[in-house]
Amino acid sequence: MIKRLLASLSVGVAVATAGVVLTGAAPASAAPCSNVEVIFARGTAEPAPPVGLTGSAFLASLRSQLPGRSVAQYGVNYPASASFTDRIGTARSVITGVEDVQRRIAFLASACPGTRVVLGGYSQGAVVAGYAVSPSVTLPPEYRTYTPRPLAPALLQKIAAVVLFAPPSARFLADAGAPPVVVQPALTSRTARYCIAGDNICNGARLAGPGPLHVLYAVNGDVIRGAGFAARAVRG
């Protein structure tokens, strides 16, 4: 049912983002450095790669709220695995995304020092984005080999804002055997989280499959609010 809802929403998002050119994940050296780059991790099995429906809608809104500034995109390169019964595989999926985020930020710091980073993610992608800027991620013993390293303090300064849509709650992640999403203290005031009331993934409910509200972030206004938060941070 979730896949059918996502497919139907993709039509609306395509219309909303018509005329917006979405750049790929090419190295920044292939084109002039942008004023802002959005690094976005899509949700589980979400259509419209590389950033997904939520990421596409967020980018379109952010561009509209930052007139006169160039806003590039980078879709986090990770599987966004839907095989949750394979916990090792899921852990690998998430950590692959975390490492890609951290590499991209380091690359931009070197190649495009003037580019501001907006880091975002939806659902599983919000876990990826959150873990990438966490002070520490404590994993159970069987996952310890996948533990990501904290991002260097100098690289944290590149990040203007962190915007998380439907980040799985601490209860949800604990039931799945995963640590909560906690960002570095330096980013606390630059981080916004959006959870639709009744979305069982992020509202503190126990571990379960997502309900229909979980796929509405691209159309319920949260991407506009999240883009506003990011735009204010970039301008600040």
Image (cartoon, rainbow, N blue to C red):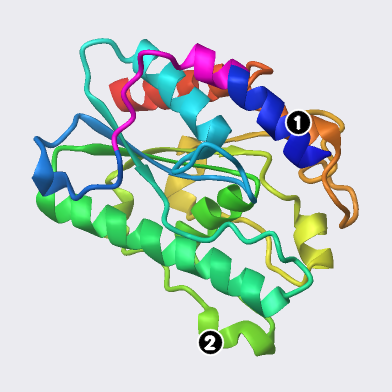
Left or right of 9: which side holds 230? left
Residue, x 75% and y 61% (percent of image)?
173
Name the residue beneath numbered marker 1.
5
Name the residue beneath numbered marker 2.
145
Evaluate whether residue 195 shows in this view. Answer: no
User: Could you say which is closer to the camera, residue 189 or residue 220?
Assistant: 220
User: Could you say which is closer to the camera, residue 182 or residue 87?
Assistant: 87
Tell me how far mark 1 sits from mark 2, CA to CA. 36 Å
User: Could you say which is closer to the camera, residue 73 or residue 196?
Assistant: 73
Packing grade of label 1 (10 A; few <14, some 14-19, many >=20) is some
- SS category of the residue bearing label 1: helix
Above or below — where is 13 with respect to 172? above
Residue, x 86% and y 39% (percent of image)?
211
Residue, x 68% and y 39% (percent of image)?
166
Amino acid type of the residue tagged 2 in the rendering: Thr
Confirm whether the magenta stretch covers residue 52. no
Confirm whether the magenta stretch covers residue 21. yes
Dividing the picture into quadrants, the one containing residue 69 is top left
* Residue 46: percent from left, percent from top: 61, 43
> From the image, which quarter does the C terminus lie in?
top left
* Residue 195: percent from left, percent from top: 72, 33
Above or below — where is 12 with respect to 55? above
- SS category of the residue bearing label 2: helix
Q: Which residues are magenta?
A: 12-23
Packing grade of label 2 (10 A; few <14, some 14-19, many >=20) is few
Amino acid type of the residue tagged 1 in the rendering: Leu
Evaluate whether residue 216 shows in this view. Answer: yes
Residue, x 78% and y 39% (percent of image)?
2
* Residue 197: percent from left, percent from top: 83, 28
* Residue 22: percent from left, percent from top: 34, 29
Label annotation for residue 129? none
Left or right of 129: which side holds 154? left
